[in-house]
């Protein structure tokens, strides 16, 4: 009976407090759980605004890796203890039969031949390198090919106004037999501007034998197709002087 009376009094007291509107129920008597969902909106920031290090998204192709390795080797090769062997005798023997006007200068161990025809001009570089003291651990085929290709690219780069699209033929070969290797690349050029045509030829030939690397590289441009053929025969004469 006492319990019923006390419950009734408590109910009446609570109703009176609520009706007044000045007193709210104690906060401790009610437990409320709130779930909050946060949505992150991506923001565009510049490289200067970001505190995180930039992550490279581009990758190097296999061709680019090979080119980088070749460039590194060329730098190491010419910085290694190699020495140049005099090749002036071979140059003199070949050039005495040439129909081109020519002059020969020696620069850093390289015989540089300047050629002039009636309708065109060109150049040939000849060098012989003793690599017996070179400590670079590379296959002889790789050495002949890499140095030969480097010389070919330098030679083609000296052909004024000629691009890759102007080459109508291209040949490339590397051959290794026992303890010797050879590399050859050549291409013919034919281009016209609508009024005149140009004919050209570029070649690099490298032979590595008995610790000696001999390289002949040259190019010629002319408005006369016959002069291109004459130059090609001149390069053949140099190849025949290099034993393999």
Image: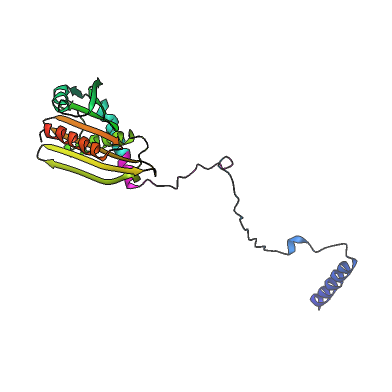
Residue 72, horizontal then vertical, whole percent = 30, 34
Residue 138 seen by the camera: no
The residue lying at 20 percent from left, 32 percent from top is: 216
Residue projecting furthest to the right: 20
The reply, left or right, for residue 29 in relation to residue 163 is: right
The reply, left or right, for residue 217 in relation to residue 27 is: left
Callout count: 0
The residue lying at 27 percent from left, 34 percent from top is: 220
The residue lying at 18 percent from left, 26 percent from top is: 129
Residue 123, horizontal then vertical, whole percent = 26, 29
Residue 51 lies in the magenta-colored region: yes
Between 16 and 63, the one lying in front of the other is 63
Residue 162 seen by the camera: yes
Q: Quadrant of the N terminus?
A: bottom right
- Magenta residues, as a range? 48-67
Between 236 and 99, the one lying in front of the other is 99
Q: Quadrant of residue 112?
A: top left
Residue projecting furthest to the bottom: 1
Q: Main secondary structure of the magenta part?
A: loop
Between 17 and 156, the one lying in front of the other is 156
Residue 132 lies in the magenta-colored region: no
Whether 133 is drawn above or below 144: the answer is: above
Residue 45, horizontal then vertical, whole percent = 59, 46
The residue lying at 33 percent from left, 35 percent from top is: 157
């Amino acid at each position: 009976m006492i319990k019923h009376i006390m419950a009734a009094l408590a109910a009446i007291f609570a109703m009176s407090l609520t009706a007044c509107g000045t007193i709210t129920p104690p906060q401790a008597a009610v437990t409320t759980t709130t779930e909050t969902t946060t949505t992150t909106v991506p923001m565009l920031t510049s490289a200067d605004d970001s505190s995180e290090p930039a992550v490279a998204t581009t990758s190097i192709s296999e061709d680019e890796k090979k080119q980088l390795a070749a460039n590194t080797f060329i730098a190491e090769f010419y910085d290694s203890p190699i020495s140049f062997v005099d090749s002036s005798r071979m140059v003199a023997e070949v050039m005495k039969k040439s129909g081109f006007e020519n002059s020969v200068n020696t620069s850093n161990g390289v015989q540089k031949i300047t050629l002039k025809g009636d309708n065109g001009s060109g150049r040939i570089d000849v060098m012989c390198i003793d690599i017996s003291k070179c400590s670079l651990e590379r296959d002889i085929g790789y050495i002949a090919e890499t140095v030969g290709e480097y010389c070919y690219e330098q030679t083609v780069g000296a052909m004024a106004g000629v691009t890759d699209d102007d080459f109508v033929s291209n040949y490339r070969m590397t051959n290794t037999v026992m303890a010797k290797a050879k590399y050859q690349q050549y291409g013919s050029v034919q281009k016209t501007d609508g009024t005149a045509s140009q004919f050209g030829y570029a070649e690099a030939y490298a032979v590595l034998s008995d610790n000696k690397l001999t390289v002949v590289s040259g190019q010629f441009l002319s408005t006369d197709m016959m002069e291109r053929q004459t130059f090609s025969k001149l390069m053949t004469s140099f190849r025949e002087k290099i034993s393999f």
